[in-house]
Amino acid sequence: MEDEKESLDLEVKNEEDKEDEVSLYYKAKDLLEKILIDMHFEDVKVIGNLEDNIIKLEAKIDPKDTGIVIGKGGKTLDAIETVIRKIIKARSNKVKLNIDINNYKKRRDEKIIMLADQACKKVLKTRKSWNLKYMNSYERRLAHEQISKYDKLDSHSEGVEPKRFVVVDYK
């Protein structure tokens, strides 16, 4: 009987957590829309979903305004994401937040993977280490994941933030 009660309590808690995640999703979505409208962008559309504990938001704005909201090297977009993450208290609520504008992050991820592949081919050909450009921690993780697909190669990071980079080594 006690086990059934604990199981029921756990189910109720999981449902409450899911409800909290849904309300956080809508709060994050509304905040992103408001920020973009307050930045005077017109025809703002924010779509998204909640996968497991990850809030994924994609904003569509006029393509000519993309550079303004993304900023140099994605810094403005990162700042917007950080502000929303802090407001919804993502860490304490155990949710992650991922915001993309006009598929910028998707294209950036594809570019990082392509650069990692190119470096891998150079290292396989020359058997000499190759350094990738400076990257943030997320980009380095993407590069390391791609490099790990090559049996004869290894990778590590060097440097000090913000000038850390991935080194591809021949094993």
Image: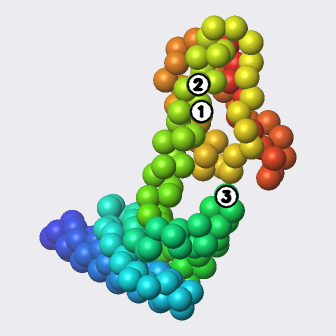
Q: In the picture provided, is 100 more to the left or to the right than 119?
A: left
Q: Residue at x 48, y 49 (%)?
A: 107
The picture places residue 49, in percent across and down from the top left corner, at: 31, 68
Residue 128: horizontal and vertical position, in percent?
Answer: 74, 12
Label 1 element class: helix
Q: Quadrant of residue 77?
A: bottom right
Q: CA distance from mark 2 to mark 3?
A: 21 Å
> Residue 21 falls in which quadrant of the image?
bottom left
Label disc, if present, on residue 73 of the rendered structure:
3
Location of the C terminus (image quadrant): top right
Image mark for residue 115: 1
Residue nearest the viewer, comparing 25 with 127: 127
Q: Amino acid at mark 3?
A: Gly
What's the CA distance linking mark 2 and mark 1? 5 Å
Q: Going 66% across and 49% down the picture, which residue do you hit? A: 137
Neighbour tally class for label 3: few under 14, some 14-19, many 20 plus, Cα within 10 Å:
few
Q: Position of residue 78 (x, y in %)?
A: 61, 67
Labels 3 and 1: the sequence-earlier one? 3
Q: Quadrant of the N terminus?
A: bottom left
The numbered mark at residue 92 is none
Residue drawn 44% across and 64% down? 102
Q: In the image, is residue 55 above or below residue 20?
A: above
Label 1 amino acid? Leu
Tell me how far mark 3 sits from mark 1, CA to CA.
Answer: 16 Å
- Nearest the eye: 142 or 134: 134
Tag 2 and tag 1, C-beta contact below 8 Å: yes
Mark 2 crowdedness (10 Å alpha carbons): few <14, some 14-19, many ≥20: few
The residue that disc 2 covers is 118
